[in-house]
Amino acid sequence: MAAAGPSVFLLMVNGQVESAQFPEYDDLYCKYCFVYGQDWAPTAGLEEGISQITSKSQDTRQALVWNFPIDVTFKSTNPYGWPQIVLSVYGPDVFGNDVVRGYGAVHVPFSPGRHKRTIPMFVPESTSKLQKFTSWFMGRRPEYTDPKVVAQGEGREVTRVRSQGFVTLLFNVVTKDMRKLGYDTGPLDTRGVSGPSPSQGLPL
């Protein structure tokens, strides 16, 4: 009797939230979480985490380096709802209150291998100058009650935002049984590093 084929595939992701560029700010920390579809389920590792506080490097780059590890495994029956990682960066304002300095999201790379991604970050803006002054004075800047909204399109068109900073992530992606279920994940030899080049205008 023939053995039954696999009914699910696995997506294994590890890597790190490597560094960030926020020229105007210092002493920042980062939170991450994953957003995924209904057919997906985590089977190992951590779905969310919070990094240490880091200060700018003393060289000309003035990078904020976290090297904060990511390690999670998902299973699914189809690729719809492919996982995204949502990042939130926080730091102190002039009054010492923790305020959000940037939100961003990116899909976990679809092909196996080592990938580098640089994510442009943004923050919500107050709709009027009075609200902006009040939120600054009270130490309560506009922020999302649930950062996962960043990975969804619903309601985003009515949100005013401002671009601010970049975060660089490193992914190591391994898939299992996707080909057996009929999904093409790209070339079998995936030893190279995939990601944006400096010529695309992103920070080094």
Image: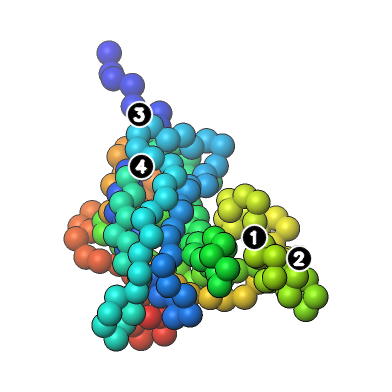
Amino acid type indicated by mark 4: Val
Identify residue for label 3.
6
Going from N to C along the chain, the mark reached first, 1 or 3, is 3
Check disc 4 and report its element: helix, strand or loop: strand
What x and y, as percent, mark residue 39?
A: 52, 35
What x and y, as percent, mark residue 49?
A: 41, 47
**Could you tell me which residue is drawn at 50 percent across and 55 percent down?**
86
Going from N to C along the chain, the mark reached first, 2 or 4, is 4
Nearer to us: label 3 or label 4: 4
**Could you tell me which residue is drawn at 30 percent across and 39 percent down?**
176
Going from N to C along the chain, the mark reached first, 2 or 3, is 3
CA separation, marks 2 and 3?
A: 43 Å
Q: Residues within 10 Å of mark 4 (few under 14, many from 20)?
A: some
Check disc 1 and report its element: helix, strand or loop: loop
Q: Nearer the viewer, residue 119 or 176?
A: 119
Nearer to us: label 2 or label 3: 2
Q: Is 43 on the left or on the right of 41, as rendered?
A: left
Q: Residues within 10 Å of mark 3 (few under 14, many from 20)?
A: few
Q: Nearer the viewer, residue 168 or 90?
A: 90
Which quadrant of the structure image shows residue 95? bottom right
**Contact? badges 2 and 3 (CB < 8 Å):** no
Identify residue for label 1.
143
**Label number found at residue 181:** none
**Could you tell me which residue is drawn at 42 percent across and 35 percent down?**
42
Identify residue for label 2.
158
Q: Residues within 10 Å of mark 1 (few under 14, many from 20)?
A: some
Instruction: Decide: is 196 above or below 86.
Output: below
Identify residue for label 4.
72
